[in-house]
Image (tube, rainbow, N blue to C red):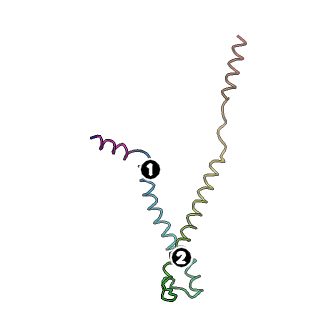
Amino acid sequence: MGFLKEFKEFAVKGNVVDLAIGVIIGGAFGAIVSSLVTDVITPLLLTPALKATGAANLEGLVWNGVAYGKFLAAVINFLCIAFVLFMLVKGINKLKKKEEEAPAAPAGPTQEELLAEIRDLLKNK
């Protein structure tokens, strides 16, 4: 029974649960970013640029018998996803910075000030 109890303590620790939630949210977020790149950015930006260069079918590019088009498409996809994530993190950091700059509540008297008041009150008695 010691093994089961130890496993239960491990499985319900905050770190393990937080990690599990992070992985699940990360997977869902990955789907959102992939859809953004595939369904929005590629049709708006990459497709016209590829048609202008005469490479409308990027994955079909072959040079000396080497099909490098799929690799090139994967690299472009990675760069698009990395850029979208960079802009997202930059925006989140900007929002966090605004929250940090918000004025803090006025602090009460310090411990030294309170002790000085007590000392003065005791002197006056």
Residue kind at label 2, given as amino acid type: Thr
Q: Main secondary structure of the magenta part?
A: helix
Q: Does the magenta-highlighted stretch encompass residue 11?
A: yes
Would you say the residues marked 2 and 1 are in contact, meaning their CB atoms lie under 8 Å apart? no
Picture quarter with the N terminus:
top left
* Residue in view at x 34 percent, y 42 percent: 6
* Residue in view at x 72 percent, y 13 percent: 123
* Viewer-side residue, 115 vs 109: 115
Q: Which residue is mark 2?
A: 42
Mark 1 Cα-neighbour bin, 10 Å: few <14, some 14–19, many ≥20:
few
* Viewer-side residue, 57 vs 32: 57
Q: Which residue is mark 1?
A: 18
In front: mark 2 or mark 1?
1
* Viewer-side residue, 89 vs 9: 9
* Residue in view at x 51 percent, y 83 percent: 58
Q: Position of residue 7 (x, y in %)?
A: 33, 45
Mark 2 Cα-neighbour bin, 10 Å: few <14, some 14–19, many ≥20:
some
Q: Is residue 117 above or below residue 24?
A: above
Q: Quadrant of residue 125?
A: top right
Q: Position of residue 44 (x, y in %)?
A: 56, 77
Disc 2 and disc 1: Cα gap in Å? 34 Å
Residue kind at label 1, given as amino acid type: Asp
* Residue in view at x 57 percent, y 83 percent: 50
Classify residue 102 as left or right of residue 9.
Answer: right
**Region in magenta:** 2-12
Q: Position of residue 69 (x, y in %)?
A: 50, 82
